[in-house]
Amino acid sequence: MNTATNPLESRCTRLQNALAASQALGGASPAHAPSALIAEALEFARAARGQGRADLAVPVLERLVALAPHEAGGWQQLGFARAEEQRMPEAAQAFERATRLDPTDPVSARALAQSSLDAGYPASHLFDHALRIAPGDLGAVRGRAAALAAEGRADAAMALLDATLTRFPDWLDGHKSLAALRFTSGDARGFAASYAAACDAAPRNLALRMAWFGALMQTQDWHGALEIVAAGEHLIGSCSAFDVARTLVASESDDRPRAAALFAEHAAIHDDALQIAHLRHCLRTAQLEKAEQLALELLKRPVAPTIWPYLSLIWRLCGDARAQWLDGAPPPISVIDLDCSAAELEQLAVVLRRLHTARAPHVEQSVRGGTQTDTDRQLLHRAEPEIQSLRSKVCTAVRAYVAALPPHVPGHPLLGTPRGGVLFSGSWSVRLRGGGFHVSHTHPMGWISSALYVSLPEQRQRGPAPAGWIAFGRPPQGLGVALPEYGRVEPKPGRLVLFPSTLWHQTLPFDEGERLVIAFDVMRPRH
């Protein structure tokens, strides 16, 4: 990009030069750091970060802390900028310097704890320090629970959340974290108990009741979900939230006559979840014209990334050429065998196995017959050298994939996006055992998605091909829609498969052994 036409980039260059010149004149001493220049550099960093350009803030801030190493605000801002650039180990280093310079600052203390957790370092003691400074910080309580769980102390994490929820029963994030910990620890029956206790304490809290309803919906406990609604209506009275909830249950449980009646009755309610459920109902009942109408309207809203995959199904069922425009003909699926030795893959597998501490998959995920690492913290943010080395290779492969994409197509979810740097909206590992698979799904939070194979069963364990392969284009079973696959890819250790996040994909079951995979979503570039 031409810096002459980009004021932010021009200002970045000017500030770097001014900071370097000031350091050359006076050395690394705050006595020689002009206060006006420091203030301007900090203001620029905040402005750049506010515009999604932490990549410009980082070099200015690195110049600033070299010039004024005792400026706690500079180290704090550098930590935030590095974190936004997903350089978590380096972010933690910057926040550590900031807390040393200002030990009582709650912002730096909390940020140091969170970045350390994200980088894979022990962090529960850092959250303890943050909570001593700011005892009422519920976000830090949630972070401490996550850190305890990451350190192998899931029971302590659940006890902390449970005790805190007794004092703050309307803390929705706390309920979500506790339910997830209980479910992945194997408590599929009582995982949502904290919601029930909280609703006893605050029976007319609608947001709390609907969060409880949502938790049971994820496990397809239709009866339990309807009981929550009925009890809420008795206590609170009728409201649109309960109307939507009953309609969602009828639709997702495939009670088609009742769903049709409820969609008609509540047509005036403008709710994205309701409209998506209606779209799914229309697909199940072959009302393709209505399904397309709903989908095109939803594309105008923030839920658009969720809607494109449904439009693909609608257009394919209608024989509409726009399906090829959307998915590609053929879809841009890239198979890259990374330069990873058998020893490197085995060392990586050792690291990943250590992270698979859950007993059950997350309730909202596509995994069946296996476990997934914590999706609240990105795998590729971790500091282990095995992971950082792999991340470097992955970024190179993603850049090559993006460079090979067709030219820009306005309005297209893959091709209509700027071709910027590589950042991740999610990264995790999945460990499947014999009989395990992924149901057909997509990745609404991503731009480009992936499967990277680390360790696979022997062919004799897997079963006949295509056991354990990844398949593309098959609709999810719950929609009852019949369409052929676009194709399949055979997994091999060290193989990376890249594809659009809007593309339906699934993993086919295999017979025996361990299938250890890393997956990630590349974030849609902002510039």
Image (spheres, rainbow, N blue to C red):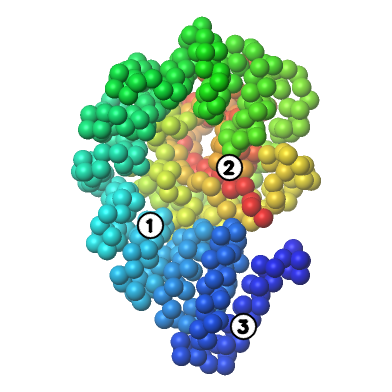
Marks 3,2: beta carbons within 8 A:
no
419 or 509: nearer the viewer = 419
Q: Can residue 314 be seen by looking at this rendering?
A: yes
Q: Amino acid at mark 3?
A: Ala
Q: Which mark is residue 114?
A: 1
Q: Amino acid at mark 1?
A: Gln
Point out the tag, 3 or 2, that comes first from the N-terminus.
3
Tag 3: Cα neighbours inside 10 Å, few (<14), some, or many (≥20)?
some
Tell me the residue that label 2 is attached to: 446
Residue visible at 47% across and 17% down in the picture: 247
Measured Cα–Cα span from mark 2 to mark 1: 23 Å
Question: Which of pointers 3 and 1 indicates the residue nearer the eye?
Answer: 3
302 or 288: nearer the viewer = 302
At numbered mark 1, what does the secondary structure look like: helix, strand or loop? helix
Residue 198 image offset from top left, x and y in percent: 25, 33
Residue 302 image offset from top left, x and y in percent: 59, 38
At numbered mark 3, what does the secondary structure look like: helix, strand or loop? helix
Q: Quadrant of residue 208?
A: top left
Tell me the residue that label 3 is attached to: 18
Point out the tag, 3 or 1, that comes first from the N-terminus.
3
Tag 2: Cα neighbours inside 10 Å, few (<14), some, or many (≥20)?
many
